[in-house]
Image (cartoon, coloured by chain):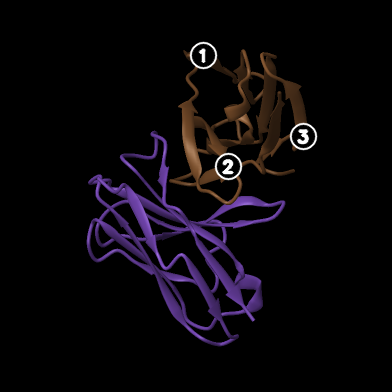
Chain colours: A brown, B purple
Amino acid sequence: RKEVEQDPGPFNVPEGATVAFNCTYSNSASQSFFWYRQDCRKEPKLLMSVYSSGNEDGRFTAQLNRASQYISLLIRDSKLSDSATYLCVVNMGTGNQFYFGTGTSLTVIP
Amino acid sequence: NAGVTQTPKFRVLKTGQSMTLLCAQDMNHEYMYWYRQDPGMGLRLIHYSVGEGTTAKGEVPDGYNVSRLKKQNFLLGLESAAPSQTSVYFCASSYSERQGQFFGPGTRLTVL
């Protein structure tokens, strides 16, 4: 089993739609969780951290479910500019090791 | 404020050649990381550093060495390049292990 798993997609959604991605992780002792976005042939950029109580940043909402060992990202009112690959990242708590998912591809269609 | 910069942006090596990738950050971050990204595999941690003069192995350290002589710089060395090291290399930095990382633009390396 991979340490972090994501549905690769692709997700093709119309503008204005709501879309959600999930990411599962293997180590119950994991401590820190993040969502990044990566545009084609660019570096990953931090989208948001994921806190135990859940957190929101504009149209983006992140949730953590420790019991089921997954994190989620919800995007409301999708924009064309949201088209990208979304990476989930988990610090397993074993030292300073971060594990990246392989990413979920999102395309927002006009 | 340049953030995280990487040099070079592109490089082609022949098998057996050596090279050094340079990463620099101007955010006074303690933590720095080197990753490689390959299709279908996500980013994998090669080595990391938790402060000047310290380095540690990540998930895929074999064939690479690193040095952190100055807080703002983190060097990744390939002593004898192999085709399996063809990849995109990203450097990143952060304030701590609990906070998100900021990435450089990447180095595309091809080993023939």
| Quarter location, residue B36 | bottom right
The alpha-carbon separation of the residues under discs 3 and 2 comes to 15 Å
The alpha-carbon separation of the residues under discs 1 and 2 comes to 25 Å
* Residue A96 vs residue B68, the one in the foreground: B68
Secondary structure state at the residue bearing disc 2: loop
Does label 1 or label 3 sit earlier along the sequence? 3
Q: Is residue B6 visible?
A: yes
Within 10 Å of the Cα at label 1, are there few (<14), some (14-19), or many (20+) other Cα atoms?
some
Percent of width and height locating residue B52: 24, 58
Count of labels in the image: 3
* Residue B71 as seen in the image, left or right of residue B4: left
Residue holding disc 3: A9
Q: Chain of mark 2?
A: A
Percent of width and height locating residue A98: 51, 44
Q: Is residue A80 above or below residue B14?
A: above
Disc 1 marks a residue whose amino acid type is: Gly
Residue holding disc 1: A54
Does label 1 or label 2 sit earlier along the sequence? 2
Are discs 1 and 2 both within one chain? yes
The alpha-carbon separation of the residues under discs 1 and 3 comes to 24 Å
Q: Residue at x 76, y 29 (%)?
A: A11
Disc 2 marks a residue whose amino acid type is: Asp
Disc 3 marks a residue whose amino acid type is: Gly
Q: Chain of mark 1?
A: A
Q: Residue at x 69, y 55 (%)?
A: B39
Q: Quadrant of the C terminus of chain B?
A: bottom right
* Residue A45 as seen in the image, left or right of residue B28: right
Residue holding disc 2: A39
Secondary structure state at the residue bearing disc 3: loop
